[in-house]
Image (cartoon, rainbow, N blue to C red):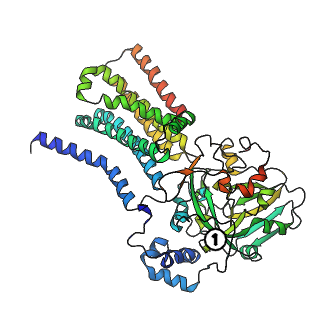
Amino acid sequence: MSAKNKASMVKAGVFFICLVPLIYLIWGLFTENLGANPVETLTRSSGLWALRFLLITLLVSPIRWYTGLTAVVKYRRMLGLYAFFYAFVHMLLYLGLDQLFNIHDIWKDIIKRPFITVGFISFILLLPLVVTSTNKMIKRLGGKRWKRLHRLTYLVASLSCLHFLMLVKADIREPVIYILLLLALFFVRFLHSFNKKSWSLADFFRKLIYNTSTLWCELTISQ
Amino acid sequence: MFFRKQKSWEIAESEVTDFDIYQNRRQFLNTSISIGLASAFPSMALAATEDNPTQLFKGLSNSPFSTEEEKTDFESITTYNNFYEFGTSKTDPALNATAFPDKFESWKVVIDGECEKPGTYDYDELIKPFSLEERIYRMRCVEGWSMVIPWIGFPLADLLKKAQPNANAKFVEFTTLYDPEQMPGQRRAVLDWPYVEGLRIDEAMNPLTLLSVGLYGKELLGQNGAPIRLVVPWKYGFKSIKSIVRIRFVEKMPQTAWMKANAREYGFYSNVNPNVDHPRWSQAKERRIGEFLKRKTLMFNGYGEQVADLYAGMDLKRYF
């Protein structure tokens, strides 16, 4: 098998692995294995998988830096698009089964309920990332601008964690786990920013201020 | 609806052995046989049932308060529960309460406070004087889902009258068992244990307010609040306190567990009210367990005729 064939096989493999949660949920729906409230299970699971894929996407760069496995970058776009896909399913379930696609009710809900507002903004912020995910768009925007735009992923992941935290009634253990994972991903980036290139003292302080403020924002969110 | 149909391996409800297994949970604690093991070896389960016949409630009278609406299936009622004493996920209580309570017969309920005849009652003493009836009530959870449950019980008022509350008794305070050994969820301070709930005395005396000891003709299971629980059908589910060990007449409004946790979100009254939203979500609609789409929530959960006058002149937005 040629190297090219092998690469596309791996890519197809990753694609199907990412589909497993969806298949599992659909299977559960038809075999009645989603518990007494299947709609709740579907909504929760799709939201969770969106968040998980966001974090997995953010894990790609650190893996490359620390293991030297440069090939992983090839799957980042797919993982990011899967994050969007599960977020889309999550959104669709909310719009359809919770709100019956009633625009008036949906709008009222978005304005009135902070956790819906945060979730909705998070979803909207994913849209420019999806639209600019093609090679053509990367070229059109230019690598540097494209990269800057795609830093929105950090905001989306933070807002998604916040959305999760806000909807919990009393037991915040589960959202806190995701918040800690996200903080770890931010921290790894913070560390990495020092050894990317030779650095000046001014550069060091600029980064320190920038990165600690990001961290601080995250910490206040987790309160 | 397709997810409601019987699975191919299911047998008729009347033949489901699970009931017997559940009913004999006390034997199962003694013999340390889990439900999973028992279902894997049905002969063991049957042996246990022969030793100790299950307590089924018979000769129940029907209540005029019962709804005609379609009942939620037994499996959903017993596997989808909020009972934080056994864990915070919906499936935790059914998994962690299989052997609860271990001392069913010696379960004691204390009745005290502002009354002439306080006392401590065993489970049997407590329920024996009253005639049990079946009441099919709607139950609406504050989270936006609902069920229809055929409870078995007797009006709380019957019991309260026996204790002869005095003129100072303005409220009734209820307490759930505190026993982290049996209730693993209490090992973490998710709520300020023990769980406390309360009603105004006139709410407690309302004929709708039920003390329940069973559902679907059988003894309550741990996850549903065995051996005795409250059912207040016009209020959100969390007002219907489970596994009661104390009923106390008090002069001041009790501080309930959920008020202590978050008074802005969980008020003392917590009447089902589609017009007063929970701060984080709308209460206008609910999803009936077993249905895909949401339905409109009824004022006082549809029991306005019986209870609306309790709140005449009150601003229900303020006293939510």
Residue A161 as seen in the image, left or right of residue A5: right
| Residue at 51% in and 78% down | B14
Q: Is residue B215 visible?
A: yes
In terms of depth relative to the viewer, which is nearer, A30 or B50?
A30
Above/below status of B55 relative to A9: below
In terms of depth relative to the viewer, which is nearer, B150 or B229?
B150
Picture quadrant of residue B40: bottom left
How many numbered marks have been drawn onto this rendered protein structure? 1
Residue B157 as seen in the image, left or right of residue A148: right
Crowd tier of the residue under label 1, counting other residues whose Cα lies within 10 Å: few below 14, some 14–19, many 20 or above? many
Quadrant placement of the C terminus of chain A: top right
Q: Amino acid at mark 1?
A: Gly
Q: Is residue A196 visible?
A: no
- Residue A220 drawn at (x, y percent): 55, 31
Above/below status of B315 relative to B132: above
| Residue at 72% in and 56% down | B305
Above/below status of B236 relative to A131: below
Picture quadrant of residue B215: bottom right
Residue at the far bottom: name it: B50
Q: Chain of mark 1?
A: B
In terms of depth relative to the viewer, which is nearer, B58 or B46?
B58
- Residue B104 drawn at (x, y percent): 66, 73
Above/below status of A53 relative to A41: above
Location of mark 1 (residue): B214
Residue B225 as seen in the image, left or right of residue B3: right
- Residue A8 drawn at (x, y percent): 17, 42
- Residue B301 drawn at (x, y percent): 65, 54
Quadrant placement of the N terminus of chain A: top left
Q: Mark 1: which secondary structure?
A: strand
| Residue at 53% in and 75% down | B19
